[in-house]
Amino acid sequence: AELARHTEDDAARQAFAGDAEQFVAWIGAQRDELNAIEGEPAERIERVKAVFADGAPAREKLDALHEKNNALQARGIFSNEYTPHTTQSLELLNKQHSDVVANLLASVAEDEQMEERAASQARELKQKEERTEKRLDFETRSKELQAWCDAAIDQHTDPINVDSPEQVAPLQEALVRTEEERTAKTPELEALTALEAQLKEEGESVSAQPLNEKWSALGEVCAERRTALEQEVARQQEHDAMCREFAQKAGAFEEWIAGESKALSEASTGELDAQLQAVQARQQSIAGGADRLRELVELSSRMDGAGITQNKHTVVTLPNVQAQYEQLESAVASQIDLLQKEMLAKQESQASPEQVAEFQDAYRFFCKDGNTLRDFEFKACLNSLGEDISDERLATIMGEIGNSENRVEFTQFVDFMVGLASDNMTHNEIAESFREIAGDKDFVTAEDLRRCMPEEKVAYLIESMPPYEGVEGGYDYNKWASAAFDQ
């Protein structure tokens, strides 16, 4: 489109240049024709007048050139490399030609020249009066159009403060009205441009430059405003889409939490084993909600980054659903803990409540999926409770107590540990072992434990043993042994 416009502009320049050259040649030819007229003065006067025709042919040609020049200027073209001639220079050439004709007529008939001079003076006076009137009209109309441009520029450079795509629409409508008004006022601008050229040709000191600058500035403001409003619509639509997405996902997540809560409640019926399995299944299902929550967190973060502070599509917020999900996780964990304790109590295990609590803590510490122990987790758990077994022994035990997936469930783990607790090891023997590790002290430190135990076992014992009163970094192994192994 830009190349086509340049091509059209270039063609318009060449057309004007060609017409200007023809006019200059026409003036020269007419001058030669007038100089060649012979005969009696009266006859010569009549023939000169007939040929010159009061300059009407020249004026017609000049008016056509003015129209083309105005068209060029309307397209923003103010220079022409194809010709040295301008409408001003052609007007001057025509005036010079008129002067030559006048001198010729004056030389033929001085009386007629005197009469013409008087008539010319009268015309000049009238023209002066007309020029004064046209100048005042030009100035008044120019100021009015410039004031309209100023007001429109002020209107469409105001900041865009909106919160939705719908709020952009009135601003766009106002811009359309301004653009339509500007189009409707274009003929007035062209008329003032033509009037400026005419007044300048007549010697008046006028300028449409300030008006043209305001007009161009308004065009640029409208174009920038249109782009800015389109971008704002896109931005608001993007914000609205994020709000809708959050509302849909948050609502669906709330429904999912409600469904899981109901399913968890329904799972708490029947035999304890069946209840535990059902609740553990719900725990795995609930764990899958972390991905959905993560999506909401990421989406909320994007909304924060975009400066979105309100969501008209939902009253649900991220803290709401986070709290609901955390409550659901806590509820299922508490339910599992309660069922396990009830099952242990029902089994009438030989383990003391303290031992059961110790076994349960160790089990939870090493159980990564929340339900069962894999073989290496089972071994680490045994090590933390003071039982060092070989890989061969581990494989044998897993074959005895492991489930179909070769994993150890909590009840089987406790039964196994109760069996171990019935061995001959006494509290004194255990305490004596720790005394040897502690270097005959009544307390043991983390460094003492690390000298003879793996880190996992040390971590568990540090977490389980009560602090030794009066010694920073010391742990009371006697109390721990009593709590864990005394019947």
Image: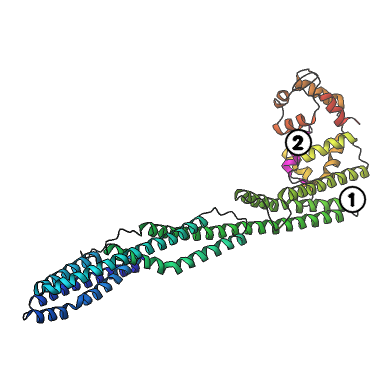
Residue 43: name its quadrant.
bottom left
Residue 173 visible somewhere in the drawing: yes
Find the residue positioned furthest to the left: 39
In the image, residue 270 above or below residue 477: below
Q: Position of residue 166 (x, y in %)?
A: 62, 62
On screen, 455 above or below 330? above
Image position of 38 (left or right of 274): left
Magenta stretch in the rendered image: 366-388
Residue 347 lies left or right of residue 191; in this view the side is right
Q: Which residue is mark 2?
A: 389
When asked about the image quadrant of residue 469, the answer is top right
> Viewer-proximal residue, 221 or 387?
221
Task: Determine which residue is flagged by label 1.
Answer: 272
Residues packed near mark 1 inside 10 Å, few (<14), some (14 to 19) or many (20 plus):
some
Query: What is the image's colouring?
Result: rainbow
Residue at 86% from the left image edge and 55% from the top image edge: 267
Residue 272 horizontal/vertical position (percent): 89, 50
Q: Can you say which quadrant of the picture contains the N terminus?
A: bottom left
376 drawn magenta: yes
Circle 2 SS class: loop
Estimate the x, y position of residue 346 in percent, counting from the top left: 93, 45
Quarter occupied by the C terminus? top right
Q: Give, as a three-letter code, the residue at label 2.
A: Ile
* Residue 457 covered by magenta stretch: no
Q: Position of residue 97 (x, y in %)?
A: 16, 70
